[in-house]
Amino acid sequence: MAEFDVDLFVIGGGSGGVRAARIAAGYGARVMIAEEYRMGGTCVIRGCVPKKLFVIGSHFRQELEDAAGFGWTVPPASFDWPTLIANKDKEIARLEAAYTANVEKSGAQIVKSRAVIEDKHTVRLIENDRKITAKYILIATGGAPNHGAAIPGIEHVISSNEAFHIEKLPKRIVIQGGGYIALEFAGIFAGFGSDVTVIYRGDNILRGFDEDVRVHVRSEMEKQGITILTGCTVTKVDRHGEEFTTHLSNGSSVASDQVMFAIGRHPNVANLGLENAGVAVNPANGGIAVDHFSRSSVDSIYAIGDVTHRFNLTPVAIREGHAFADTVFGKREVRVDHANIATAVFSQPEVGTVGLTETEARAQFSHVDIYKTTFRPIKATMSGRDTRVLMKLVVDGATDRVLGCHIVGDAAAEITQAVAIAVKMKATKADFDATIALHPTAAEELVTMRTPTARHVRQATG
């Protein structure tokens, strides 16, 4: 008789948990995975995928306007929000079914229930109060929206979760936040015709990104009519029938039909029973504390993805889940390299970035060269749209290695995915220079910028 019911019990059916379950099952492990909501997790159900569909849909208004410059006469167009929601729901249902089928094909068993840890080898399924023993437990419960400190009227505020299901497009919306989610939804709603006001507590949006990117994105968003108010926060939300008044810390207020908070996400660790097994939480970020192999403070319990609050990106969770299964069940140690992870913000304009910012590079390296250009994209020369693209390379002035690449403009994410390979391979600026340009493209600027726009030398102290 087997010592445990299963070899691996995965809590959470998101991208990371699903990858770990499938790979572990492929190694012959007996795997059970519990998901209390829908298979696919945040990214598939109410995150990256539906968000990108909304972004694509919101571009069409601008595309129709731009068409006139190329000779097209387009009759007045209308937009129907319920149609978008219905078609989005259909696609998400298809993806959920695919996730479920792929897990089942791998041989892993899915249980639709919340799972709570009882001890280092036992979980309890809340749905039927059943206990399952497992040699290993993997926590992959992701993150959840964080509204911050309670304020009067917080019950009137929606998060990105609800934004995918609102019944009608708001004519006016207030969004608090200055990161990925806030700016992406600001562009989405503005693209569909909403009047958008962004509220952010810091001095500028996109904290942690390169300063030139932050300035450029804000300028481009404001050109589109999006109001960005920085240095203040929401202190109260009043409801008057179907309308809201959002009160700000600077004494002003904003009227709207919807209020959304996107000020961050916190690790989904509540009521998991971590204390029952003695699983430690990192006091610095609230995520489950893990080592380089995603092992928690309890040797039989691991955690991957957003619940660890390391790098909260879906592909990172997938890579961590795969590495976990390779290490524990494939019997070969695989350690995820978290350096030089490319990321994108599907704001409008889009941001793609990989590697160090200028500020980070100057703090780490004595000699830093900057190559930067802004230019009007070829499409805008005919459409007449007032927009510019930003391209920036951060280079180690001593070794010529490209340390970072930052792009703002159409297809920034697609370009950055390719550039990330070069940065990961430690390509030099000379390697970029030796690459013949692909013309006419925006990306050719990355291999045609020859003269540094700035050179920084840190003086030795002593």
Image (cartoon, rainbow, N blue to C red):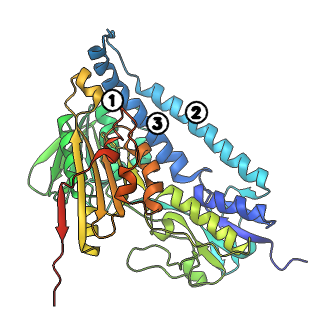
Whether residue 432 is visible, yes or no, is yes
Labels 3 and 1: the sequence-earlier one? 3
Task: Between residue 220 and residue 25, name the one nearer to us.
Answer: 220
Q: Measured from the top left, where is residue 223 in percent x and y? A: 18, 36
Three-letter code for the amino acid on which mark 3 is drawn: Leu
Mark 1 residue crowding within 10 angstroms, few (<14) / some (14–19) / many (20+): many
Q: What element carries label 2?
A: helix
Q: Which of marks 2 and 1 is nearer the N terminus?
A: 2
Q: How far apart are marks 3 and 1 (CA)?
A: 13 Å
Task: Label 3: state its secondary structure.
Answer: helix
Q: Which of marks 3 and 1 is in front?
A: 3
Left or right: 386 in relation to 298: left
Disc 3 + disc 2, Cβ < 8 Å = no
- Residue position marked by numbered label 3 in the rendering: 53
Residue under pointer 1: 192
Label 2 Cα crowd, 10 Å radius (few <14 / some 14-19 / many 20+)? few
Q: Quadrant of the C terminus?
A: bottom left
What is the number of the mark on residue 90? 2
Mark 3 or mark 2, which has the lower sequence index? 3
Q: Is residue 13 above or below residue 53?
A: below
* In front of the other: 71 or 1: 71
| Amino acid type of the residue that numbered disc 2 sits on in the rendered structure | Lys
| Circle 1: residue type | Phe
Picture residue at 44% right of the left edge, 48% below the top = 161
The residue sitting at 47% across, 25% down in the picture is 83
Asked which secondary structure carries label 1, the reply is loop
- Are the two marked residues, 2 and 1, in contact with CB atoms closer than 8 angstroms? no
Q: Where is residue 436 in the image (x, y as percent from the top left)?
A: 40, 42
